[in-house]
Structure formats: C-alpha cells, structure tokens
Image (cartoon, rainbow, N blue to C red):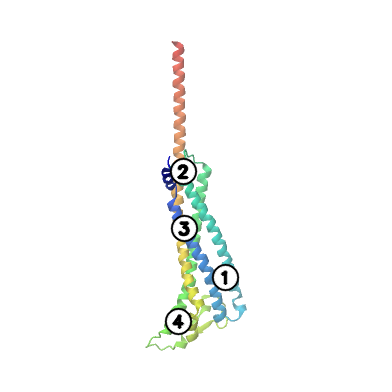
Amino acid sequence: MGCFECCIKCLGGVPYASLVATILCFSGVALFCGCGHVALAGTVAILEQHFSTNTSDHALLSEVIQLMQYVIYGIASFFFLYGIILLAEGFYTTSAVKELHGEFKTTACGRCISGMFVFLTYVLGVAWLGVFGFSAVPVFMFYNIWSTCEVIKSPPTNGTTGVEQICVDVRQYGIIPWNAFPGKICGSALENICNTNEFYMSYHLFIVACAGAGATVIALIHFLMILSSNWAYLKDASKMQAYQDIKAKEEQELQDIQSRSKEQLNSYT
C-alpha cells in the first residue's frame, strides 16, 4: 500500500461529526467562561461605584460572584478533558465500524462505556440548558438599563415625565438588598453609567457569554446524536459478531462430521 492509499485510509477513519462537535463545544465553553468571567468582574465594579457604595450591602453578592468565577475555571477544565475523551471515543468507534485496523471485536465493557457517555452527555445537555437560561438573566437586566438610557438620550416630546424622573432600581432584581444605598440611579447620572466602559463591555460580554452557552448546548446535542448512533453501531456489530461466531462453529462441526464420515468409509473399503 502506497503513501496516498495510507493517507486516504487514515482520513477515512476521522470522525468528522465528532470533530465538528468538539470544536463547537470548545468554542462555546471558551466564550462562556472567558466572557462570563470578565463580565462578572465588570458588574461588581459597576455595583460598587454606583448602586451600592456600602461594601457590607453587596458583600454576599461579591462572594457569590467570586464563587461563580471559580466554578467557571472548573467548567473550562472539565469540558476540555471531556471533549477530548468524546473525540477519542469517536475515533475508536469510527475505526471499529469501518474495520480500518483489521478484525474488530466489540466487548460488553466497550458497549457499557458508550452507553455511559450517552447518559452523561444527556445530563450535561440538560444542565447546560439551565446555564443558557441563567446566562440570559444578566443580558435582560443590562438591556433594561440600556433601553432606559436610550429613553433618557431621546425623551419623548409629548411625555409628562422629566428626564431626571426616569430611573433604574437594581434592587428590584434581588442582586442587592433593599436597604442598599443608593440602589436607584436617575436621569443624567444613569446616562453617565451607560457611557462608561465597564457598562459597555459587561453588557456585550454577557451577550457573547449567552451565545457561547447556546453553542455549547448545540454541541452537546450534536454529541448526543453521535454517541447514540455509535452505540447502535456497536450493538449491531456485537450481534453480527455473535452470529458469525455461531456460524463458524457450526461450519467447523459440519466439517468434523464430514471428515469422520470419510474416515469411516475409508476404513470399510
């Protein structure tokens, strides 16, 4: 076999579906973790500088955000390892199904591992649906603040409410207690907050983090379809292997019977 044929054979064993899902999963997790980490830090800075000047009022929130940042580190590390494992499982199953490396024999342990990956990926997919929904909450909050600032910049001509009476109270979202001071920002002060770099960056980073969570959900659904298909292939291969073993055993027994019959006939003659 020449070099070209070897390359074609190797390319035939690449699990392209698993490769695309892995790249999408890595990209989504990277966007969610990286942008989410920076956006959380910017949110804390905005709250400390404008909405809650007393440190004790948002101490619990700061601890929760710091804990979430550590969780982000764990998520990034786990999915980096899990994506590589699923990609390796895709290489193994693709090579097995196409029988690129000679005779293939599946085992009960291999089928059990594939089934375990299907279940684990399903659980992670459901969990990431929750993460995707949770990541939309800060986007909604920042959008409300941004839309209020747009109203302040371009107030309606027939409105009865003055610009200084247009306010945003972040205490209603439950992220800081009701006794936090000032808690509510109005008019030009709110417009100045929207013009800060922290607000602009945090808002758009939360949007990107939400998109990254959505991409991760799509990648996990893609992985789930691939793993289910691979598990079905392995199950069929196991049945075919058992059939071929029984057939080979019966053929061997038939050959033994025929050989003994010939020997008996030869002994009579």
Name the mark on residue 149: 4
Q: Secondary structure at mark 3?
A: helix
Q: Residues within 10 Å of mark 3 (few under 14, many from 20)?
A: some
Image quarter in which the N terminus is found: top left
Q: Marks 4 and 3, Cα distance to the nearest angstrom?
A: 38 Å
Task: Report which residue position mark 3 lands on.
Answer: 23
- Residue 175: give x, y in percent of width and height: 54, 75
Residue 38: x %, y % from top left: 53, 70
Residue at image mark 2: 96
Is 38 placed left or right of 1 in the picture? right
- The residue indicated by pointer 1 is 65
Above or below, comparing residue 170 to residue 25 in the picture: below
The amino acid marked with disc number 4 is Cys
Relative to 3, residue 154 above or below: below
In the rendered image, the residue lying farthest to the right is: 56
Q: Whole-percent x and y of residue 85? A: 52, 52
